[in-house]
Image: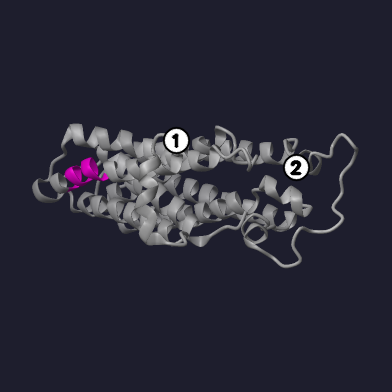
Amino acid sequence: MHPAPSIILFTTLSGLGYGLAAMLGLALLDPGAIATKIAHVLALALIAGGLLSSTLHLGNPQRAWRALSQWRTSWLSREGVLAIVTFAPLACNALASLWSGRYIPLAGFTGAVLCAATVYCTAMIYASLRSVQAWNTQLTPLCYMLFSLSGGLILASLFDTLGAGALEFLPVLAIIAIIAAWMVKFAWWRRMRTEQPLSSAESATGLGFIGKVRLFERPHVNGNYLTNEMGFKVARKHAAKLRWIAVGLGGVIPAVLLALLAVAGGGGGWPSIAGAGMAAISFFAGVLVERWLFFAEARHAVMNYYGG
């Protein structure tokens, strides 16, 4: 599949934003601290930025609102509806922190639950597609939710450090979430490499009863939408290198920096702030690479007609 930059940014930014918003909704940070107020603004900005970037992939972005009408049957529509609904409790909680330095427990908890539901719906847009076998597994939403949780905990650790907090358990929880996320991702990659294709040239053409089907001539001489969007290929050697880059940036480096932060005990010193900030930046870069591979390595069943 063609890895569109707008969709990669959408899933990455919104995942981090919802993860941070969920941590704020659970009242893990001091609502009166200036750093926490900045965290609220950043969470909403990440979510809004991710949602806006997703419209860049549409042929007619001005018609994006029409996708909201099919929430009964479409995961894309459900994700859009939930994204809008989730803004209400998140905004209420953010305003309470900004103006009065307090949390609204009901709004915070509701927002955290809706954040998790929205990320799940985003993942199910891909996991529900039987035509892309690599995506069609419950490991896909589990990966999305764990990466969102990891990003939220990393950012919460950063803002706790900026606010001179001393919540040593936040970096520890972030490390646990990072390890869990990459363990599930390795299982996802293993499944993709070892699974037997459900669709083949024989099943696609209906000629399997004759014997082995091979392509005599492509359906189109020139490229078209299907070959451009569904026929993207990445070399196996390059994919392997990018996997290790993703794991290093999104897993190893943040985990090491967070471990040092936990040992140091936070406290708001510049070394702690720098370490937490580098962990957040590295994780973001690693997830960008992971998300690029998520699309680039996926194989659409329609390519059976093109000898894919």
Verify whether residue 89 appears in magenta. yes
Along the line of sight, the residue nearer the viewer: 227 or 32: 227
Instruction: Check the image and report above or below for 210 versus 40.
Output: above
Can you tell which mark lies on residue 295?
Answer: none
Residue at image point 12% right, 45% down? 101
Is the stretch drawn in magenta largely helix, strand or loop?
helix
Q: Dot 1, crowdedness within 10 Å: few (<14), some or many (≥20)?
A: few
Along the line of sight, the residue nearer the viewer: 284 or 144: 144
Decide if residue 272 is in sight here: no
- Quadrant of residue 140 in the image? top right
- What separation in Å lies between label 2 and label 1 (alpha carbons)? 26 Å
Q: Position of residue 112 (x, y in %)?
A: 30, 36
Along the line of sight, the residue nearer the viewer: 30 or 97: 97
Q: Is residue 304 left or right of residue 258?
A: right
Total number of numbered discs in the rendering: 2
Q: Residue furthest bottom?
A: 222
Q: Residue furthest right?
A: 211
SS type, badge 1 = loop
Residue at image point 65% right, 39% down? 133
Which amino acid type is shown beneath numbered disc 1?
Thr
Q: Position of residue 290 (x, y in %)?
A: 56, 51
Can you tell which mark lies on residue 204?
Answer: 2
SS type, badge 2 = helix
Q: In the rendered structure, which segment of residues is drawn in magenta? A: 87-94
Q: Is residue 257 left or right of residue 110?
A: right
Q: Residue furthest left?
A: 100
Q: Which residue is mark 1?
A: 73
Decide if residue 40 is in sight here: yes
- Quadrant of residue 130 in the image? top right
Q: Is residue 290 left or right of residue 59?
A: right
Q: Position of residue 35 (x, y in %)?
A: 23, 53
